Image (cartoon, helix red, strand yellow):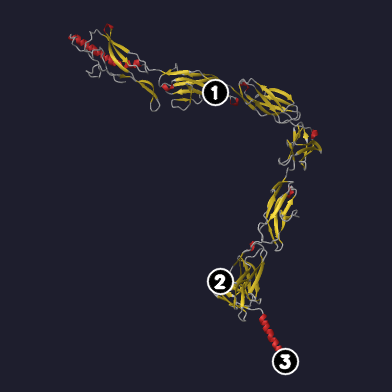
Amino acid sequence: MTLTSVLLILLILALCRITQAFGRPVLNVYPTNGFVKEGETLKFQCGTGKVRAVIWYKNGQFFAYGWGNYYETLANNETGGSYHCEIYNSWKKSETVKVVVTDRNVAFHVVPVSPLEGETLKLNCRYKYDHRWKKDFGFYRNGKKIHSMWLPGRESSYSIKVNSTDDSGWYSCKIDWSESRNVKVQVQERFAQPVLRVEPASEVFEGLPVTLTCTVPVAQPFVLLHYSFYRDSVALEAVPGLGSIYTINAAAVNISGNYTCEAINTVYSLRKRSSSIQISIKQVYTVPVLTVRPEEQLFDGQRVKLVCWVEANPSQVSLQYSFYRNGIVLQSPSHHSDYISESARPTDSGIYHCEVTDGKVWKCSNQLDLSIMRIPVSKPELIIQPGKDLIKGDTGCLICSVSNGSLPIYYQFYNSSSVELYSELSNSTELVYNIGPISRRDEGFYHCSVRNEVTGPQHSEDIEITVIVPVTDAVLISFINGTEIQSGDHLVLWCQVREGTEPQFLWYRDNVLLRNGSAHYHVTADGGELVIHSFQRDHVGRYHCAAINKGTNNTIFNVTSDYIKFTLRARSYSKEIMASLLPVLLMAGLLVSGCYIYRRATGNSSTASQPRITGSQPSGEGTAASNLEYAVVGAAHNAENITADLVYSEVTIKKRKEPGNSIAFCSDVKKDSKTDLDDYCITYATLNLSEPSQEEDGGDGNVYMNIPRK
């Protein structure tokens, strides 16, 4: 072997060692397919050379450092990721190895899981087994397929750009029928939705400046944004302001609409639009509208009024109005918005318009073509003053009027018999005919008629006049003789007036109004009669009636009758006493006569006892006489408020000796506060009696008799 060959071999061996010394280390993972279940041992080996210091990385982040080229750990749900190693002090990094912790046959890896808007999302789907035939790789978001492909091998990747937070969700992949786990991806905003503000307000008057400002509340650092403005979704041609501000120097009505703004990031091609704001530019005053009154056909002599109407804000503007006919000014600018012709003529026909100005802007109204014609007379209206109801003796008037008609107008007034009362040719649209003083013969229907040289007679509606006669001379009439009423009697009073329209009657006792509905009296339906069913003490008093009726304007007429005082007639107790005492007196007379005859027959007048008329009273009671109570009907109240008073009097019947030997039996009546009774005596017989005996009922010369209560 030559020296050259030996040197070449040595050079080759040196180069191999240099390559080994400076070559890239290889990272091996066990299990070799990179799939590991939770709880299993995951083992890494960085290169195959001597033991040296190694730095370990996961997903590009340092996580461990140690001597030796081995690293072991127990797999959990956070173990999965991309791993690589680096030999310390040599800057030699291995290739990246993917490790998946799953119990499935398909591993799914997403980078990053929290991307910013505009970034690219990388999806990797890896099969556990290394089969070389084609397989269906499918990628899903929230269960909906977003991409699919047919590829050989065990791994496929797909990248998408996330433009908004709407791309957030649960991502997964599927290889044939094997499905991976779901991975949640939350897209973060690079900048928030812009907000549009309007100043001074979204409703302003024309001519005022308006400023639109587009602001982004939140944005990532170093995000550069540009802005655009839109009205009714159409981009405005230029932005007068700077950046996020758009200024309208003088607002006009035609710029009203829905405004939005848009923030744009050109680096990531992101665009976000604000919510819309309705901007309404209000007119200081509207376009004037010219109207005419009346709106129908205009006639000769008629009052015509032109009105130039605008809607304006009084606090914003002071307006002036001008009126034109056939382009010739009729009224110079003034603050009056109407133009009046009190008596239009055919020469006033033409084309009219008005103009309105606030000193800066002129606005012209629509045009009106007016034609003035002669006026037919309208249907007349007849009214009565002061009203259709007139009071007897007053005066009234009939007024016949028309709303329009060429003058002069011929007026005629008629009564219900179509007899003409009055007529006149007048240059007025109304005529007055006076009537009065009013009497009953003026009642009835009235109407008027009008005509002019254009139209024939026009008749008004009939109007009825009613004459009201005030009540006069009220008279109170009683249907009984006298004013003393026996208790329990029926009393009827009648109220009459000499004249009066529809009188109403009121009844009074002692100036107190009597109201209908009492159980003791009632008023008839027409109010003219008062009936007391049973006259009692409570009914005693002064009675009178009043009659009323109404005139116009709620005027009340009333008259009052004279008073009649009714009293309760006292009963005659003398007849009752005599009727009660007569049988007793007869019996007493018979007994006295019998005793007298007996004493004469026996001849022992000195020892014969004087007979005692006692009735049912036993002898020996001395001079104690019984009292007699008489009931007299008066005024008291029982529980049912029915009048029935009882008055009692004590009565003693005595025998009194009269001159000529006559005997009289008398009732000595005890008087009380409610009765006024005198002593009543009746002479029964004239007897020739001897001197009275000392044994007579206590020796007082009286014979006492008991009479039962009536």
Which one is in front, 636 or 9?
A: 9
- Say which of marks 3 and 1 sits in front: 3
- Say which of marks 3 and 2 sits in front: 3
| Sequence-earlier tag: 3 or 1 | 3
Circle 1 SS class: strand
Q: Dot 2, crowdedness within 10 Å: few (<14), some or many (≥20)? A: some
Instruction: List the residue tagged with mark 3.
Output: 3
Q: CA distance from mark 2 to mark 1?
A: 113 Å
Q: Residue furthest front?
A: 89
- Is residue 43 visible in this depiction of the protein? no
Q: Amino acid at mark 3?
A: Leu
State which quadrant residue 296 falls in. top right
| Sequence-earlier tag: 2 or 1 | 2
Q: CA distance from mark 3 to mark 2?
A: 61 Å
Instruction: List the residue tagged with mark 2.
Output: 76
- Position of the N terminus, as image quadrant, is bottom right
Point 46% across, 23% down: residue: 531
Instruction: List the residue tagged with mark 1.
Output: 548
> Is 672 on the left or on the right of 451, as rendered?
left
Which one is in front, 542 or 102?
A: 102
> Is 707 on the left or on the right of 185, as rendered?
left
